[in-house]
Amino acid sequence: MNTSPKENPTIMRGVIMHAPGDVRVEDRENPTIVEPTDAIIRLSASCICGSDLWPYRGAEDVDHQAMGHEYVGVVTEIGDDVKTVKVGDFVVGSFFASDNTCEICLAGYQTHCVHRQPGAPTGAQSEYARIPLADGTLVATPGQPDADLIPSLLAASDVLGTGWFAAVAAEAGPGKTVAVVGDGAVGLLGILAAHRLGAERIIAMSRHADRQALAREFGATDIVEERGDAGVERIKELTGGLGAHSVIEAVGTQESMMQAIRATRAGGHVGYVGVSHGVALDGVELFFSGVHLHGGPAPVRRFLPELIQLIWDREIDPGKVFDLTLPLEQAAEGYRAMDERRAIKVLLTT
């Protein structure tokens, strides 16, 4: 086992959600190596995800849960079998632990790795985190990043990679019109991804001026404020009555999924990455829509090397989705700000 010269402390601070709406920062035991494929990292920054709001709002069960699955930091300790990262490396990781060597991983679907550990790592809204399957989950940056790059590297851990997967699943590209349902961090970074992939036209569905401005900065060419059937009709008006070639669904509700499917032209593609809650599809409508559906939990690990390099070379700046930065001790305020839509995404400093 390899450890940094300064041993990890026994106790650290971390975010615990006791119940819906009840977020506290408490002392927790510092993580330790459990398996020889583990690594321990000291978090440089973490953040609050839109998916964290589901249990916060009571839409998912929660009981004294350690929160957080987006992370960047410095490796402080590695298990005996870890080969691709070393103590002292600055690393970015995925929200699913995967070995990155099985047949499914090699096909680019690390979130479905045969040895995957869903929801691992957990508790990344903290000072330290244990990362299982470190070789397959973590990617080291080319060096120690400048401080201003850390927000963008943190975005790559989830929301950028998820938005990128959504754009790829929707087959965004040259000559395509892309519509984006959802103006949270994932939807906004889906716009950035679609723009980088060469989409000709990008329609952002948003009712919020600050998010509309960031959408345009990331590459949106049109804004649609209508929702539901009215939103679908507006998309069709903008596309000669046909609908968009590619639609990104980044919310996860029944309304958002149906809006995405109905706004897509026959033969078009929907990339859905919103965590589904209560979504049910009518088989007959889907059958006659002629629409391709592809999505699910994003295989962020597939895209990390490319995304890290784009950020390192300062070709993209996804960190702009963080519009509120708070110390870890004020995590509860961060949850309130996102719940009340006073913030797009909250970065927590450790």
Image (tube, rainbow, N blue to C red):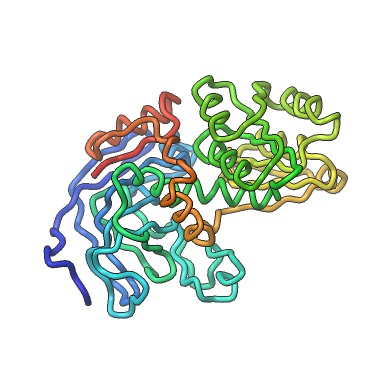
Q: Is residue 32 visible?
A: no
Judge left or right: residue 326 versus residue 244.
left
Q: Which residue is found at the position 15% from the left and 55% from the top?
A: 11
Judge left or right: residue 274 versus residue 200.
left
Q: Quadrant of the C terminus?
A: top left
Q: Is residue 13 visible?
A: yes
Judging depth in this view, the residue of 202 and 129 nearest the camera is 202
Counting from the top left corner in percent of width and height, residue 101 is at: 51, 75
Counting from the top left corner in percent of width and height, residue 221 is at: 66, 29
- Relative to 204, say whether 296 is above or below: below
Q: Which residue is found at the position 85% from the left and 48% from the top?
A: 287
- Relative to 184, say whether 212 is above or below: above
Residue extending furthest toward the right: 288
Judging depth in this view, the residue of 55 and 147 nearest the camera is 147
Q: Which residue is found at the position 24% from the left and 68% from the top?
A: 87
Counting from the top left corner in percent of width and height, residue 124 is at: 32, 51
Q: Quadrant of the N terminus?
A: bottom left
